Structures are given as C-alpha cells and as structure tokens.
C-alpha cells in the first residue's frame, strides 16, 4: 500500500524532483516539475496528519532496517502539524514563484533555482519527519546549503555578503548541533530520538548530557534566529530573491523551532527543562529582548523587506515565549504562532515581492501612493499587517490570546502587559508603511504600476484570506497546537 | 407594533442588520460610476438598516429575547449577539442619525468638492456595520472585535484630506485608540476571562464573589482607560485630533457612533461585567466618580479656550462623554438610566452643532469662533439651529438634554454624592459660557471687516439635515418616555 510509505514519500519526492529539475535548462520546465512536486506535498502531509489523529504516532523504518539501528521516520501530532505547515506554504507559493523568479533570476539560472528550492524543501521536511538525531543533522545541512545558495541568487550584490554571513553562522550552528548529538551518542549509545529519550532517563543531570543540551540549544537557536543569534536573518531576508524570502520566512525558522521542541520535551523531558534548569527564565529574557529590540529596530528600517525581517525576529520571540511560559495554554500559543506567523509573513513578503515585481524597489519612500496603483496588493499588505499587530479577527490575535492567557495563568500579569506593549510597536512599524502606501501621492516612478498578474495575486490573496479565516476558525490551527502542547507537556518518552 | 419583521426569527434579524451596511459598502463601490446612484445606495442602505433596527425594537418592546447562536473560536472566545435595551437604544440612535447624516453628507461633500467620495461613503457604511456589531454584541470578545474594526474603518475617514495635518491627526487617532485598547482593554478582557470563566454580558455582572476589591479596582481602571473611545481624560487627545476629518465624519462618528461606542461599552461593562450591586457594595467605583467629574469639568474648561469651532465642540464632547461615564460610575439605577439617556440626548444636540459648523464652513469657509460675529444675519437658519443644539446640550427646556441631566442628578442623589450634583450644575454653567456666546454674537455682533457679501445658507440637503436633528432635540423633550420605557427594561440583577 502506498499510504504506508507516505513518510518516505514526503522526503523522497522533492529529492527526486530536485534531481529531475537539474536536468532542465529552461526555467519554465523546471518550474513545472517543482510545481507538481510542491502541490503533491500537502496531500501527503494531510494524509499523515489524519493518520496520526486517528491512529496515533506512525513509525516508519527507512529501508526496512528496524529502529533503533536503522533510521526511523516518526510522525506524531507535533511534526505532522509542522509537515502540513511547510508543505502548504510550499504549495501556495509555487504559482507565485514563476513570474517572480522570471523577473529576478537570470534565465540560465532559473532551473538551478528550482532545483535548489526543492532541495531546501526536502531538507526542511526531512528535519521535521525524521526520528534520528544524525539524520536530522544531514537534512539540516541539506536545507542550509540550499538556503545559502537561494539567498546568494538575489540580484542585489549584498545578497552574496548576506549568504556568506549566514553560511558562517549557520555552519557554527550546525557544528554545535552535531557536537551536542555526539555527546548524547557517547552517553546513550543511540541516535534514535525515541530510544535516546528512554536511555537518558537517570543520567539527565550528568555533565555530558547537560553540555549536550547546551550545545543543541545554541546550535538550533542559531537556526531559528533566537535573539541575539539572529544577526544573519535581516540581511538574508532582505537581499534574497522575493520567492526565497517568502519561503524561508514562513518555513525555515519554524522547522528549527520544531527541532528545539523535539529535543526539549521528548528527549530531555519537562523536568530537566523546567525544573532542573533555568531554561524558562533564559527563554523569557531572550524572547522579550527579541520582541522589543527587534521591533524597535524594525521601526527605523528604510527597506521594507528588512523591516519585515526584523519583525520576524520579534515574532519568533512570541513563539519562544510560548516555551518560556511553560504551561499548556502558553505553549499552545507558541505552537499556533508557528502556523499563524507563517501565514501572515508569507502574505506580507508576497505583497512586497509583488511590489518589487512592478516597481523594482522595496525602499519605503519609493512605495509612496502605491496603494492607488496596486490596490489588491496594498490591501493584502494592510490585512496581513493587521494580523501582525494582532487585531481581533485575525490569526495574530489568536496567538496573542493564548500567550496572554497562559501568562496570566502563570500569575505573570506583567508579562501580559509586556506582550501587549510590544504589539504597540508593531502598530507603529506597520502603520508607517500603510501611511506611505495609501496616503502619499503616487511616486512618479510607479505611475504605471498595477496589481501583479493573477498567478502572483491569487496566492497572496489566498494567504491573506487565511489570516482572517483562521482568526475565526481555529480547529485546525489552535486545536492541533493544543493537542501537541498537551502531548509535549505530558512528558511523552 | 406593526413593525415586527413578519415571521423572521430574531437571529435572522440581527444578522441582516449586520449584513445590510456591509453589503451596502460593496454596492457603494459598485455604483461609484454614478455619484447620484451611489448616494442613493447610501440612503437606501441607511433607510433599510433603520427599518430593520426598528423591527428589532418592536420585538424587544414586545418582551422578546433576541439572540443568535454562538460561534466558538478558542477557549473562552466566542462570537455571538444578543439584543438588550442599552444596545437597542444605541443601535436606534446610530442607524437613525445615519440617514440624516447621509443627507447632510451629500450636501457637504458636493458643496466642498471633496475628493475620494466613494471611499468616504464605503468607510461610513463599514463603520456603521461595526457600530451595530458593538451594539448587539453578546460578549466582550465580540464587542472588542467590532470595536477595533470601528477604529480601523474610521481611520481613512480621519485622514480623508490626505495632507500632513490629516496624517498627523490620523496617527494620534490610531495610536491612542489602538494603543489603549491593546495595552489596557485586551489584558482586562484576558483577566476577566480567567477570573470569571466567561466573557458573556450577564445581568448583575459575572465577577460577583470572584475577586477582591483591589482586583476589581485595577480591573475597572483597565477597562475605563482601555476604552479609549470614551475619551476619559487623560486619553482624550485623539478626539480633537480626529477633527481634521470632514465635518459629516465629526458629526456622526465623533459625536455619535465612535464616541458613543466608547461610553456604551463603559456602561455595558459596568452593568453586565461588574454589576452595579457589586461596585456599590465594594466601593470599587468611588475613584471613577471623581475621575469622571474631573474629566467633565476640565473638558468644559478647555473648550472655553478654543477658538476653532470644531475643536471647541470636540472638547465639549469630551466633557459630555464624561457624563455617561459618571452615570455608570455612580452605580445606581437612575445614574445608569441618566447616562444611557445621555447617549441619545447628547447625540441629537451635538450632531446638530456639528452640522451647523459644517454648514458654516461650506457656506462661508469660516472655522474660528471669532470670525462668526454677525454671520447669524446672513445664515439665520443655521444659527437658530445652533442655538437649539446648544440649549439642548446645556440642558435647558424645552429640549431633550434636560432629561438626561435630570436623571443623572437623581442618580447622584441616590448614591449620596451631593458634590456631584454641584459639579453637574457648575458644568451646565460652563456649557452656557462656551456655547451660547456663539449664536448670540452671530446674531447681534458686528460683522467683521468687509461686508460678508455672497454668503448665503448652506446647500439644501445640509439644511434639511440640520432641521431634522434640531426638531429631534425638541421632540425628545416632550416624549422621553419612549426611551425611559426601553431603558427601564435593563435588568440590573
């Protein structure tokens, strides 16, 4: 039965797709392959999610080698949710990609772009699905190397520097990760995460295990751009091709957060994380620093893509805050924000990518009055921006509600005040752009601009509509996030 | 009553009331090609909405309990609507005056050749839809949702002119209203959800026996200052800032819909979240009485210093809104009735005054009080109406404003607050001091400078609207029992 092999297909299909793409020289053919592959991914991911919801976790022995000796793909509620997130975003942006890539990437490199994109997708899905610590490292490297290349394909020459910067930082992160895995392997003698979790019991507080935890935390935090390890992110997002920015902002950091949750809660366990170590306090401080520091920096950006990138750092702060709050409601808030932030940030970067497609600039002053020429695009920007602020009726509000409720349950009323204060800063940086695009006179350069072609417009509007829809219907988002949070906190081993 | 909406269920009526202005906004956009059709659409929409609201009123007066089902969103959050007397009154006032205001808008917008009129009428319709949502909200979340939509939909109206001044006003408007609601109101709602376990508006409140006096005081303060639309000092700055909007906006939104949404929410929170019994028995409302009294007097004092007519009226509104807050703060049955009645009475008086201010601007292009000397002889109708509006605001017979002040004084006596009765008297004297000189000087003063030749009354639609609202002030004096009858149905227990 093919449904038994869904876990393998989730990773193998994009990998094969990448190989096929590499044989094409024409961008549009490679695009078509990438489109077909990307559209197939959500079906597999939803199939896995349904199976998990009905039948519990799935264990898949890759190549028939039984775990813990072979590589095990293990799908439970948490990573099924992440797989759905990554694959849905991947599918929605592919129709958008064609025009945007044609516009921004030289003709002879377009096929390569799609090849690398599929490798990146494969890597991200692989990190999410694998139940093996070292296999996760391999996929992390696949996705990271692909990401460096994607960023470096940006037209702006600063993209090269940004990619190089990320290459250095990302490699340090991956090295830390692999050191952590090595230490754990030396202590437990296994690389299978579930097996590791069992064997770690009793030696959680040994020096080597704690050192492993430290290395893993720092390594993964670099990947997820936790403040102050975020320095690679603003430039990378600002100068990468539009399509790459949309994809990476919505998925790459989210998968890293997943990996952190996986280690924290299922390998080390709730007791080690919350009771024995001050991880909650550390994450609280760093999340708050991100929420305020990065938001304030965002207010002063002249490049709107860079502004949104800083906003991403701040929003990642909300996600890690969910880990810091350490109760079910708070953790639900963090996990649901993975999804919610992906929706709104993808919509925002798509809008700004569409504007770049038309007027060739993302500088705030060049965007003057663009709302009058590109009303749909600018409208999508406003709605997704409202979601970023957390206006009720949008997904941003749902995340904030859970986080605020969780903080209150913990008795941290001051944290509630800090959460809402930080969203006031987002009113300022979103409002600043909205004012320029709607209430200034149209810049001469953009007199003739109009909304982008439907292939770009529709995915953007779809995601924007989703930021509203999931603000009212939260069964699929908060509902599953809550199940995942409950499951993580129950100390599954 | 004959107007019963036939066989329609209460749920259907409420939903239609919400949909009519929303669909109206779409139709206005579709009919933008012909201004006459577009304005007719606005009028028909307003008329239909009012008819439906009256049909709902008929049901309510028959003792029917109108409510919709609820739509769960997340734990503690649900969307739902229920009609109660206070919201009924607010909906009647807002939808009724929308018709008059639309007639006025036609004269004003055409008379002043304002740009972007389609956008203007659309935002107006959306603002009215959210006003109805606020009026009929069955719980705090639903109210909060529409409260924010109201802020956002009126922002383009405030910045309508598009110049630096308008943008600066818009910034203050958005930051104060979104800021207070995010930083104070939202945490208050989260705390209420946690303490009370529900957000539903219930007769007698939902907090009885669940919180001590200190918590109640803090919570009340967060609600009162968080509801920035009530313009309680020191969060009143947005209201004078909003005066950069075209006058019809100042008239309907910043004298009726938006500000009354604020004080309506205040009253609703006091009645159905805290419950006046609870406040009166714990004394948690004591401080609010004095803050409201201070806002009441200070607003009047500042109004006296303003030479700009609209600014003077805006500060007068700040002062008059404090009456409603005071009525709620007194936590007595007459106080609540007086405050609620003032929502209607002040609406008619103040909208008349703003209509007159707009008529003066349209006809004579004058904005400062000191320029109006002698103008009454060329615009007798406008200034006669101004006198009527002023007398109603002051609270003199034979105009409606008398009644609300009467019941407020009764409420103050009921609460044993003799000083407040004195404050009410002093405030009325202050009203006389800053309102009455305007028509007196206009009629009897020396015309300034050259002959004001060429000035005649404003366009006919403006005059019709002015006539209707001043007539309203008069009628309300003779027939206040309709409102009393409705308000006496408020369940305190």
Image (spheres, rainbow, N blue to C red):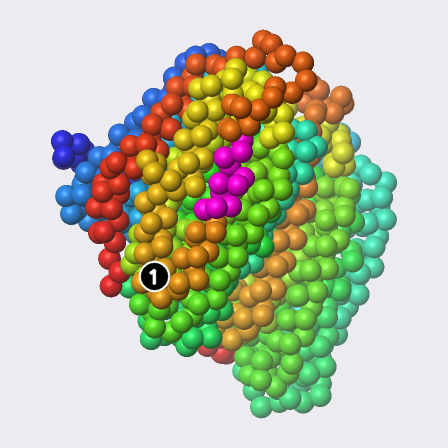
- SS assignment at label 1: helix
Residue B299 visible within the image: yes
Q: In which quarter of the image is residue A108?
A: top right
Question: Which residue sits at x=72%, y=81%?
Answer: A211
Which chain does tag 1 point to? Answer: B
User: Label 1 belongs to which residue?
Assistant: B413
Q: Give coordinates of residue B397: x percent, y percent.
A: 34, 38
Q: Where is residue A446 in the image (x, y as percent from the top left)?
A: 72, 23
Q: Position of residue B90 (x, y in %)?
A: 34, 42
Q: Can residue A76 be seen here?
A: no
Q: Which residue lies furthest to the top in this view?
A: B454
Q: Which residue is drawn at 43% across and 40% down?
A: B393
> What type of secondary structure mainly makes up the magenta span?
helix
* Residue at 70 percent of width and 32 percent of height: B164
Residues B248 and B144: in front is B248
Along the line of sight, which residue is nearer the eye, A330 or B361? Answer: B361
> Is residue B55 on the magenta stretch?
no
From this view, report whether residue A71 is shown above or below residue B380. below
A194 on left or right of A256? left
Question: Label 1 crowding class (10 Å Cα cut-off): few <14, some 14-19, many 20+?
Answer: some
Q: Front-most of B333 and A471? A: B333
Which residue is located at x 45 percent, y 46 percent?
Answer: B428
> Which region shows up in magenta?
B428-438
Q: Nearer the viewer, residue B355 or B163?
A: B355
The image shows residue A363 at horizontal and vertical percentages of 76, 36
Quarter that holds the N terminus of chain A: bottom left
Q: Is residue B87 left or right of residue A425?
A: left
């Amino acid at each position: 039965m093919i449904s038994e092999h869904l876990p393998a297909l989730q990773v193998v299909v994009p990998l094969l797709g990448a190989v096929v793409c590499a044989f094409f020289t024409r961008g549009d053919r490679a695009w078509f392959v990438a489109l077909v592959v990307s559209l197939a991914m959500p079906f597999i991911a939803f199939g896995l999610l349904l199976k998990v919801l009905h039948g519990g976790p799935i264990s898949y022995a890759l190549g028939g080698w039984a775990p813990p000796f072979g590589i095990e793909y293990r799908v439970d509620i948490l990573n099924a949710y992440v797989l759905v997130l990554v694959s849905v975003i991947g599918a929605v942006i592919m129709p958008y990609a064609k025009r945007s890539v044609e516009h921004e990437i030289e003709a002879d490199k377009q096929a390569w772009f799609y090849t690398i994109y599929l490798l990146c997708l494969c890597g991200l899905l692989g990190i999410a699905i694998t139940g093996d610590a070292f296999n996760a490292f391999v996929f992390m490297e696949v996705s990271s190397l692909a990401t460096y290349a994607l960023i470096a394909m940006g037209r702006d020459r600063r993209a090269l520097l940004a990619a190089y910067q990320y290459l250095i930082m990302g490699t340090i992160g991956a090295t830390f990760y692999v050191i952590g895995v090595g230490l754990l392997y030396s202590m437990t003698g296994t690389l299978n995460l579930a097996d590791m979790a069992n064997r770690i019991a009793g030696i959680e507080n040994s020096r080597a295990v704690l050192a492993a935890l430290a290395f893993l935390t720092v390594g993964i935090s670099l990947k997820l751009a936790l403040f102050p390890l975020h320095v690679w992110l603003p430039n990378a997002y600002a100068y990468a091709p539009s399509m790459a920015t949309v994809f990476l902002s919505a998925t790459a950091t989210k998968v890293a957060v997943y990996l952190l949750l996986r280690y924290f809660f299922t390998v080390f366990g709730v007791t080690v994380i919350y009771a024995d170590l001050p991880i909650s306090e550390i994450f609280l401080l760093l999340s708050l620093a991100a929420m305020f520091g990065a938001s304030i920096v965002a207010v002063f950006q002249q490049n709107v893509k860079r502004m949104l990138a800083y906003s991403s750092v701040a929003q990642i702060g909300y996600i890690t805050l969910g880990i810091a709050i350490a109760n079910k409601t708070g953790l639900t808030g963090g996990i649901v924000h993975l999804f919610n932030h992906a929706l709104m940030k993808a919509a925002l970067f798509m809008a700004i990518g569409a504007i770049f497609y038309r007027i060739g600039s993302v500088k705030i002053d060049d965007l003057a009055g663009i709302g009058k020429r590109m009303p749909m695009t600018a409208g999508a920007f406003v709605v997704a921006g409202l979601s970023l602020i957390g206006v009720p009726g949008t997904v941003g509000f749902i995340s904030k509600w859970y986080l605020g409720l969780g903080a209150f349950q913990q008795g941290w009323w001051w944290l509630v005040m800090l959460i809402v204060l930080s969203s006031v800063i987002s009113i300022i940086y979103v409002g600043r752009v909205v004012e320029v695009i709607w209430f200034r006179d149209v810049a001469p350069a953009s007199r003739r601009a109009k909304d982008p072609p439907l292939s770009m417009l529709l995915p953007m509007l779809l995601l924007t509509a989703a930021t509203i829809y999931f603000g009212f219907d939260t069964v699929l988002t908060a509902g599953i996030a809550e199940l995942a949070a409950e499951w993580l906190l129950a100390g599954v081993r | 009553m004959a107007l019963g909406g036939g066989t329609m269920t209460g749920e259907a009526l409420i939903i239609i009331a919400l949909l009519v202005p929303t669909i109206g906004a779409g139709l206005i956009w579709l009919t933008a090609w012909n201004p006459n059709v577009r304005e007719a659409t606005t009028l028909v929409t307003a008329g239909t909405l009012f008819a439906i609201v009256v049909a709902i009123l008929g049901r309510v007066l028959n003792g029917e309990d109108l409510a919709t089902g609820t739509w769960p969103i997340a734990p503690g959050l649900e969307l739902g609507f229920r009609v109660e007397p206070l919201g009924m009154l607010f909906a009647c006032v807002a939808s009724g005056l929308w018709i008059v205001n639309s007639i006025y808008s036609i004269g004003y917008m055409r008379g002043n050749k304002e740009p972007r009129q389609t956008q203007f009428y659309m935002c107006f319709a959306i603002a009215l839809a959210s006003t109805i949502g606020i009026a009929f909200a069955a719980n705090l979340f639903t109210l909060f949702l529409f409260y924010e939509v109201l802020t956002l939909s009126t922002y383009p109206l405030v910045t309508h002119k598009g110049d630096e001044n308008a943008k600066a006003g818009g910034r203050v408007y958005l930051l104060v209203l979104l800021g207070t609601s995010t930083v104070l109101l939202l945490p208050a709602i989260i705390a209420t959800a946690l303490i009370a376990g529900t957000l539903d508006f219930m007769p007698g409140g939902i907090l009885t026996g669940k919180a001590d006096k200190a918590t109640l005081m803090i919570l009340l303060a967060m609600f009162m200052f968080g509801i920035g639309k009530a313009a309680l000092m020191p969060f009143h700055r947005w209201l004078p800032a909003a005066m950069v909007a075209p006058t019809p906006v100042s008239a309907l939104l910043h004298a009726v819909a938006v500000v009354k949404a604020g004080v309506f929410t205040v009253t609703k929170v006091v009645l159905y979240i805290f419950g006046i019994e609870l406040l009166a028995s714990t004394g948690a409302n004591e401080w609010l009485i004095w803050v409201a009294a201070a806002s009441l007097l200070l607003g009047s004092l500042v109004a006296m210093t303003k030479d700009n007519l609209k600014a003077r009226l805006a500060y007068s509104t700040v002062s008059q809104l404090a009456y409603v807050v005071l009525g709620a703060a007194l936590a007595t049955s007459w106080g609540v009735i007086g405050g609620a009645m003032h929502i209607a009475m002040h609406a008619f008086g103040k909208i008349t005054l703003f209509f007159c201010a707009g008529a003066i601007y349209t006809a004579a292009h004058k904005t400062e009080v000191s320029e109006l000397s002698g103008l009454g002889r060329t615009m007798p109708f406008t200034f006669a109406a101004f006198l009527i509006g002023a007398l109603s605001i002051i609270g003199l017979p034979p105009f409606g404003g008398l009644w609300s002040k009467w019941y407020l004084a009764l409420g103050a006596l009921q609460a044993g607050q003799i000083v407040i009765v004195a404050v009410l008297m002093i405030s009325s004297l202050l009203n006389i001091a800053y309102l009455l000189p305007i028509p007196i000087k206009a009629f009897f003063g020396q015309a300034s400078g050259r002959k004001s030749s060429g000035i005649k009354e404003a366009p006919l639609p403006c005059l019709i609207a002015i006539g209707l609202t001043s007539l309203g002030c008069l009628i309300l004096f003779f027939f206040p029992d309709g409102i009393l009858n409705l308000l006496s149905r408020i369940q305190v227990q």
